[in-house]
């Protein structure tokens, strides 16, 4: 059974779970619960900034953040990354105990705390994986705009909460100003730079 990514690289879906034989998105009530939960969640994530960029630059300099292209972790406990910061997640996962949190909703919080405490991958770490994960190797996807629209028809408007994501760990990190983070309820997608 072919595995596909939709919208963001990282989360993989069994093609047969979410698409019909004609490569149309199935009605949501025909999609099994677990992939449906991730699919609906994705719609709220595709225009969000990379978490590491956001932790670095904060709301005041949101324009300096890269838009996320990669998602890891569990729905509502996920980590969003740009390609530049993906090695940080890979390093944390493999070398800094991150894998202990695989499958847990706390996965994202633990990673954000590690980043906020100054954690980062050594220079050049993970560059090999980028070659191996060449997106050209993925099967052709149905029109993603269509996927997005179909999911949004059933989307309840819930957005990722970066305040929650950042955890209460701002004490040892000046840039994690609670007041700034609290302002992040505004819709980040409206004037967010698209494309790279
Ligand atoms: Zn980034």
Image (cartoon, helix red, strand yellow):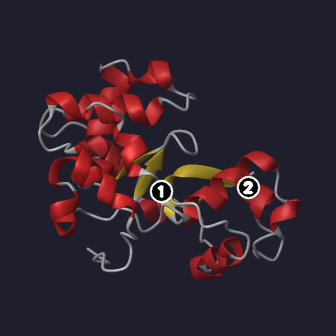
**Residue that appears at 21% across and 36% down:** 125
CA gap, disc 2 and disc 1:
16 Å
Residue neighbourhood size for the residue with mark 2, other residues' Cα within 10 Å, grouped as few (<14), some (14–19), many (≥20) = some
Label 2 beta carbon within 8 A of ligand 1: no
User: Label for residue 36?
Assistant: 2
Residue ID at (32%, 52%):
182
Q: Viewer-proximal residue, 116 or 102?
A: 116
User: Could you tell which of marks 2 and 1 lies nearer the N-terminus?
Assistant: 1
View extreme (front): residue: 179
Percent from the top left, x then y, of residue 186? Answer: 38, 67
**Residue 149 in the image, given as x and y percentages of width and height:** 65, 80
Foreground disc of the pair 2, 1: 2
Q: Which residue is mark 1?
A: 9
Image position, residue 148 (x, y; %): 61, 75
Residue at image location 60% in from the left, 50% down from the top: 12
180, 151: nearer the viewer: 180
Mark 1: secondary structure = strand
Q: Is residue 164 left or right of residue 172?
A: right
- The C terminus - image quarter: bottom left
Position of residue 78 relative to residue 157, above or below, is above
């Amino acid at each position: 059974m072919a595995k596909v990514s939709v919208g963001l690289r990282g989360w993989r879906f069994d093609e047969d779970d979410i698409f019909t034989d004609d490569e149309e998105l199935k009605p949501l009530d025909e999609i099994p619960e677990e992939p449906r939960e991730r699919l609906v969640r994705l719609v709220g994530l595709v225009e969000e900034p990379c978490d590491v960029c956001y932790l670095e630059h904060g709301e005041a300099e949101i324009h300096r953040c890269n838009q996320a292209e990669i998602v890891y972790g569990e729905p509502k406990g996920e980590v969003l990354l740009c390609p530049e910061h993906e090695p940080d997640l890979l390093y944390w996962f493999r070398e800094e105990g991150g894998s202990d949190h695989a499958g847990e909703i706390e996965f994202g919080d633990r990673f954000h705390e590690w980043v906020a405490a100054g954690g980062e991958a050594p220079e050049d770490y993970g560059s090999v994986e980028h070659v191996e994960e060449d997106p050209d190797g993925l099967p052709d996807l149905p029109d993603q705009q269509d996927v997005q629209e179909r999911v949004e028809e059933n989307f309840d408007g819930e957005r990722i909460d970066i305040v929650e994501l950042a955890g209460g760990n701002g004490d040892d990190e000046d840039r994690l100003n609670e007041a700034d983070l609290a302002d992040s309820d505004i819709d980040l997608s409206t004037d967010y730079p698209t494309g790279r």
